[in-house]
Image (tube, rainbow, N blue to C red):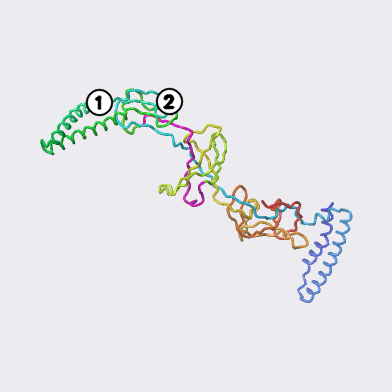
Amino acid sequence: MKSFIKIIALLPITALFIGCSDDSGNDLESKTLKLAELRTQVRELENKMKQLESEIAMVDPEYGQNTNNIVLVSSSRVKPTKFEHKIEIRGTVESRKNVIISAEIGGRIETINIKGGHEVSKGQVLMTIDSDVTQNTIAELETSLELAQVIFERQSNLWEKKIGTEIQYLEAKNRKESLERKLTTTKSKLALSVLRAPFDGSVDEISVRIGEIAMPGVPLLRIVNQNDMYIQADVSEIYIGRFKKNQTTDIHFPSQNKNLVSKINAVSQVINKENRTFSIEIELPAVDFTIKPNQVTMLKLTDYVNDEAIVVPTRLIQRDDEGTFVFGIDENSNNPLASKIHVITGFSYNSQTEITEGLVEGDLIVNEGFREVSQGVEVQIATASSAN
């Protein structure tokens, strides 16, 4: 019915312009008279249309609302709040007691006293390397040292009695002391044939068998202690100066889907020239689930904090030819009107964006319904809340 009424109201204007298009007069005076006549007719038609609208509104109360372009929106009152921006990087679980034990001397593996998974104590014998040659060398040195000691004592007695030369005395003394040093060195070498646990831990893997030849620097076994672990991560040099010792950080363990909060223990002062990063160390507190060295973690580090930031939901920010803007509500007019407020944005995090310029405390902005409004559109405010 509403559409039919609108069509009837438009018919006189349509007929009027059709009649105008049929006018073929070329005289200026006649055209001027005709224009005045048409304007009179238009005013009469407008008066008739207003009268019809009033009559229709009396019959159909919703008619007036349908011609009103007011948009229903919710609003948010801007106020300062604390804003944090975080970056997410990958970290790796490390252990200060995760070591690979190698032989310091070469030789055949004589005994292996442990197996993979065994718990060991500090100082416990793990392996021995054949030391027959070293032991024979020690025996020879001890024999030679006994003779050298006797010769030195006699030569010393003679020198005290001014018998013999000083050179003979010094040679005897030098040989004795040289043999003593060689014997000490060889005994130290003999101690290296016994591999002992450097700390309490568990045997993670054994790489050799009895009878194989151990070579200096070649791994033999790994021992791990899981009670002294931490997280290490490499951070791009663009974040220099943004992280400090004792700063809080969030840790996520993807494998177990576990989360915990810890703090930074140390920040490296040196940039790795190969990948342009610096390392940070995160304290790993005691947990109730299993963590292993080399396990991957995800870290969230706070690189920016503003305690008095103006923040709006990121979804409210739009762009036009002049830049970014949000829709504000002009409260100075009789009817609230939507208006663009051009802003300069800062960091964005967790669906929130910091506004560095354009908004001040107390500004009222459009929240729900922001995509339905345009510049100068009248709005009706449903609810008001904080912008953040």
* Magenta residue check for 238: yes
Residue 67 position, x and y percent, is: 80, 56
Q: Quadrant of residue 358?
A: bottom right
- In the depicted structure, whether residue 290 falls above or below residue 303: above
Tell me if residue 45 comes above or below residue 260 in the rendering.
Answer: below
* Front position among marks 2 and 1: 1
**256 above or below 335?**
above
- Mark number for residue 133? 1
Q: Position of residue 2 (x, y in %)?
A: 83, 53
Circle number at residue 332: none
Residue in the image at 33% along x and 31% along y:
103
Q: Nearer the viewer, residue 25 or 12?
A: 12
Kind of residue at disc 2: Gly
Disc 2 target residue: 116
Spatial separation of the CA atoms under disc 2 and disc 1: 30 Å
List x then y, in percent, for residue 240: 48, 51
* CA neighbours of label 1 inside 10 A, class few (<14), some (14 to 19), many (20+): few
Q: Is residue 70 magenta?
A: no
Considering the numbered disc 1 on the image, is that residue within a helix, a strand or a loop? helix
Q: Is residue 59 above or below residue 223?
A: below
Percent position (x, y) of residue 352? 62, 50
Q: In the shown orientation, is residue 127 left or right of residue 162?
A: right
Q: Quadrant of residue 345?
A: bottom right
Q: Which residues are magenta?
A: 219-245
Three-letter amino acid code of the residue under disc 1: Val
Q: In terms of sequence position, does the residue under pointer 2 or pointer 1 come before the other? A: 2
- Total labels drawn: 2
Outermost residue, bottom side: 29
Q: Secondary structure at mark 2?
A: loop
User: Observer-nearest residue: 331 or 322?
Assistant: 331
Proximity of marks 2 and 1: CB atoms separated by less than 8 Å: no
